[in-house]
Image (cartoon, rainbow, N blue to C red):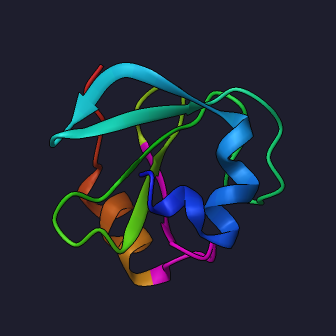
Amino acid sequence: MSEFFKTEFGGTIKNGLNKTKQQFQGQSIYEVTNKIDSPYLKKGDQLYLDNLHKDHIEVFDKRGNAKAVLNLDGTLNVSKTESALKEGRKIGK
């Protein structure tokens, strides 16, 4: 995530996130704790950098249900989002 936070989008959301003690697939989970200028992220959402490809961010609602998959520039990855929702992906608590 440190490399992601150096990107334009990563830098804009960094201050609205808190790193949790939780991990998923070896990646740290971050929680949105402040308002972020993104239509896909709201307070309480959880996210992590995909461990396999490291080319997208997986976003989950506060209940741990898949919500969206974002490209590293903050845009919605429609096909990966549809897959995550169809699979009913959840993040471990």
Q: Please, which residue is most extreme toward the bottom here?
A: 79
Is 70 contained in the magenta span?
Answer: yes
Q: Is residue 5 magenta?
A: no
Where residue 90 sits in the image (x, y, percent)? Answer: 30, 39
Measured from the top left, where is residue 23 in percent x and y? 26, 30
Residue at left offset 70%, top offset 50%? 13
Residue ID at (63%, 27%):
44
Residue 27 in the image: above or below residue 78: above
Front in this rendered view, residue 53 or 86 = 53
Where residue 1 appears, x then y in whole percent?
Answer: 41, 52
In the foreground, 60 or 51:
51
Q: Which residues are magenta?
A: 66-78
- Numbered circles on residues, count: 0
Q: Residue placed at 48% from the left, 34% from the top? A: 30
Residue drawn at x 56%, y 56% as measured from the top left? 5
The image quadrant that residue 28 belongs to is top left
Q: Is residue 29 left or right of residue 8?
A: left
Rendered position, 76 above or below 58: below
Q: Is residue 70 above or below residue 24?
A: below
Q: Quadrant of residue 12?
A: bottom right
